[in-house]
């Protein structure tokens, strides 16, 4: 093709704007001493989709997720969620209390380590109710009922709702985290290696629950995992990170079938 | 975006489309097809022909954007206007796939622990059909493709290849699309299922769905074919095989 060079594809230019973003991060920079954890990362998440973030250890994916959960503030960059009360504000400019309220009402998170996400000495229902309490719900009977419903939606055996997380298996602890995260129907659900460390059969069950929740409630999810199988099962779109930068992003089938960047090719072929 | 806009009845207008695979770790470029031009109109059925490795499946996957083209345009006419599928934003492609562009293949990406009828009903549910109604319709299509009733509530990951393919076809064809890309949908199907598939394709064609595909048994769809598009493997120096599948 003679004119190929002039005609070479420039991706992502023409848009019909068929969907508006739910979450937008621009130019996120975060340094830890001499280590550049994030070097100007841009991420957009659309309503109802599962965005997978993959990359090797130290690529910055979990740091980015902590930014999305407003646990950390970058040296530079902006963060917007499509929420009625916060349409135009950069969420990094919120103070500690405002962040806590925003997190409680609009952002859910499931950590790889349930010790971070749960109070291990409290009951499972109490852990979920705590999320509802932060958002201002004070009626005990209602709190308990809503906690029960949320645990049931996470496919947790509700007859065990008064057991403490330390009495539960790893898979069940993740379900309690999930119930807590979705109790207030968040705008976005963040999942940080939610099945890492679980045995394969339990992992499949937890992923299945997530998939069902996403299908039935159209919850917007951001899933960080180093496990390409998990990302392939769950994600609609995939962001590939390396050394604090996004090296490639695309539809999940394109990333797995026709990866463009040498690092993505290496990653995908290593899996196969 | 309005340059070279095709005629109103055209659903797809492919211009100068090229695909090659850059295999960085092998330091090789694998060529699939180069500078393709063709139009596909509403209700039209194009049969792709060519020897193995000519790029038929690669073309379908490039149109669906599972593969990224190297150059060229794939103009697609939507209710909102023209969009170049070759370079459109991923999110727009995802929305179009959900609404109006279908890809039918012989392979089912069966998700664990999701029942066959739920898998088939999913496109309807995403389109807003109530769960119960979507399940009724899904079971009707499973039945039409010859999937036995006792399998409707079972998990397809445990099914035979042929049964999985039937579930996949029912899911792919349950919702009328504007554009259907068909990648050997009849391969390994039994005769009754092939007939059910061809009958459904005839219905869809009648309803104005534009279709382009590769068929293992082209004689099955002979009466539907409007045009044939012949692909040839590109001859490039030092490259014997050009397509990676």
Image (tube, rainbow, N blue to C red):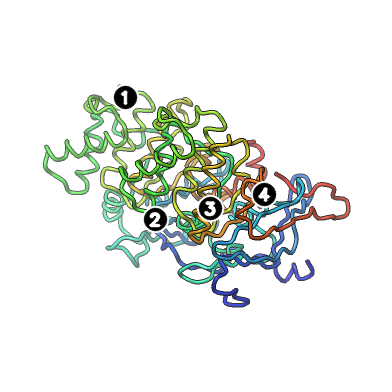
Q: Identify which residue is drawn at 36% across, 36% down.
A: A116
Give the number of the disc on residue B57: 4
Give SS at disc 4: helix
Instruction: Provide the chain ID for the residue under circle 1.
Output: A
Observer-nearest residue: A226 or A50?
A50
Question: Where residue B71 appears, x then y in whole percent?
Answer: 69, 64
Mark 3 and mark 4: span between their CA atoms? 22 Å
On the image, the x and y values in percent for residue A137 come to: 16, 46
Residue depicted at 54% across the width and 64% down the height: B42
Q: Residue at x 48, y 58 (%)?
A: B100
Callouts 3 and 1 close, C-beta under 8 Å: no
Are the two marked residues, 1 and 4, in contact with CB atoms closer than 8 angstroms? no
Using the numbered discs, state the Cα–Cα distance from disc 2 to disc 1 in whole angstroms.
35 Å
Residue on which disc 1 sits: A166
Q: CA distance from mark 3 to mark 2?
A: 36 Å
Of residues B139 and A191, the one drawn nearer to the viewer in this rendering: B139
Callout 1 environment at 10 Å: few (<14), some (14 to 19), or many (20+)?
Answer: some
Chain containing the residue with disc 4: B
Residue B5 in percent (x, y) is at 59, 75
Q: CA distance from mark 3 to mark 1?
A: 59 Å
């Amino acid at each position: 093709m003679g004119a190929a060079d002039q005609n070479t594809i420039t991706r992502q230019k023409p848009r019909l704007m068929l969907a508006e973003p739910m979450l937008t991060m621009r130019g996120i920079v975060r340094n830890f001493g001499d280590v550049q954890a994030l070097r100007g990362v841009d991420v957009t998440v659309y309503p109802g989709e599962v965005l997978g973030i993959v990359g090797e250890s130290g690529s910055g994916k979990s740091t980015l997720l902590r930014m999305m959960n407003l646990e950390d503030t970058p040296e530079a960059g902006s963060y917007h969620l499509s929420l009625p009360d916060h349409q135009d504000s950069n969420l990094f400019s919120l103070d500690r209390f405002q962040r806590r309220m925003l997190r409680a009402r609009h952002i859910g998170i499931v950590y790889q380590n349930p010790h971070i996400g749960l109070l291990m000495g409290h009951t499972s229902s109490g852990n979920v109710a705590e999320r509802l309490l932060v958002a201002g719900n004070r009626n005990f009977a209602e709190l308990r009922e809503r906690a029960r419903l949320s645990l049931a939606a996470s496919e947790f055996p509700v007859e065990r709702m008064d057991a403490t997380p330390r009495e539960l298996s790893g898979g069940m602890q993740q379900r309690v985290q999930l119930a807590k995260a979705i109790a207030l129907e968040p705008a976005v659900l963040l999942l940080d290696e939610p099945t890492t460390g679980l045995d394969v059969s339990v992992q499949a069950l937890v992923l299945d629950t997530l998939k069902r929740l996403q299908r039935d409630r159209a919850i917007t999810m951001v899933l960080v995992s180093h496990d390409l199988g998990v990302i392939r099962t769950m994600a609609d779109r995939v962001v590939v990170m390396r050394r604090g930068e996004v090296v490639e992003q695309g539809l999940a089938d394109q990333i797995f079938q026709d990866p463009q960047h040498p690092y993505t090719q290496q990653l995908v072929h290593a899996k196969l | 975006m309005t340059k070279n806009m095709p005629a109103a009845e055209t659903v797809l207008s492919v211009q100068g489309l090229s695909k090659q695979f850059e295999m960085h770790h092998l330091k090789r470029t694998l060529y699939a097809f180069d500078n393709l031009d063709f139009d596909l109109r509403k209700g039209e059925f194009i049969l792709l022909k060519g020897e193995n490795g000519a790029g038929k499946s690669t073309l379908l996957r490039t149109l669906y954007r599972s593969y990224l083209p190297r150059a060229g345009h794939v103009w697609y006419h939507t209710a909102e206007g023209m969009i170049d599928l070759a370079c459109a934003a991923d999110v727009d492609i995802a929305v179009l796939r959900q609404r109006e562009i279908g890809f039918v293949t012989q392979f089912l990406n069966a998700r664990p622990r999701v029942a066959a009828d739920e898998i088939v009903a999913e496109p309807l549910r995403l389109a807003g059909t109530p769960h119960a109604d979507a399940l009724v319709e899904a079971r009707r299509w499973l039945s039409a493709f010859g999937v036995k009733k006792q399998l409707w509530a079972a998990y397809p990951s445990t099914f035979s290849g042929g049964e999985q393919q039937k579930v996949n076809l029912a899911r792919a064809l349950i919702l009328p699309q504007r554009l259907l890309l068909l990648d050997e949908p009849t391969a390994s199907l039994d005769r009754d299922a092939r007939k059910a598939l061809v009958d459904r394709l005839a219905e869809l064609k009648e309803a104005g769905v534009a279709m382009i595909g590769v068929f293992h048994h082209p004689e099955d769809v002979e009466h539907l074919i409007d045009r044939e598009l012949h692909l040839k493997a590109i001859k490039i120096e030092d490259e014997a095989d050009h397509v990676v599948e």
